[in-house]
Image: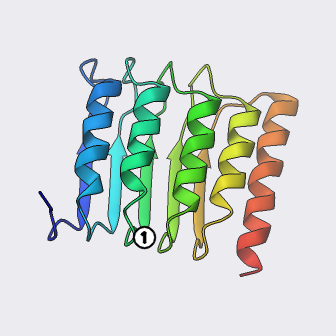
Amino acid sequence: GKAPNLSSVFLNFISCEQIGDSGLSALGKGLAVASNLTSLNLELSGCANLGQAGLLALCQGLSTAQNLTSVELDFSKCRQVGDTALQSLGHGLGQLPSLRSVTLNVRDCPQQGAAGVRAFAQGLSKAQHLALVDMFFNGQSREQADNQTAVAVLLRRLAMQ
């Protein structure tokens, strides 16, 4: 059924080994019926069983969140979160018409690289009303510079709005 009165969700599952792709998929399905959702904060740092499939399912669920204005996602230390998931997440969030702020933490995710950060920033750049982006990601030397360049391009686009 619908959850019309649900406007804000904060879930803290830090280091919960029980949360995996099927759990995130179920959460995505639940959020899909929250028609008045404006704020989402998911603390999933250290959830070792969380991977690409779960993030893809979460993105599908969020695709109907037309009123979502603020998203905070902490996937730091999630060993299976990589570039494909970041690309899907950026693309999905970039489609949300009301989105104004995004915070994403993917530090210490060994499968995350510069390509994923660039793809995330590129997808997110399509969000019409985005005003604030905070990103925390891996990076060493040239890769970190590439990540910073991708974010800088996104920020320049935001400044032009």
Label 1: how many Cα within 10 Å (few below 14, some 14–19, many 20+): some
Q: Mark 1: which amino acid? A: Thr
Quarter occupied by the N terminus: bottom left
Residue in front for this viewpoint, 124 or 75: 124
x%, y% of residue 74?
44, 41
In the figure, 3 relative to 119: above or below? below
Q: In the shown orientation, is residue 15 left or right of residue 120? A: left
Residue in front for this viewpoint, 101 or 97: 97
Q: Residue at x 33, y 64 (%)?
A: 39
Q: Residue at x 24, y 20 (%)?
A: 18
Visual colour scheme: rainbow
x%, y% of residue 50?
40, 24
Mark 1 highlights which residue? 69
Quarter occupied by the C terminus: bottom right
* Outermost residue to the front: 1
Residue 55's image quarter? top left
Q: Residue at x 57, y 42 (%)?
A: 88
x%, y% of residue 60?
42, 47
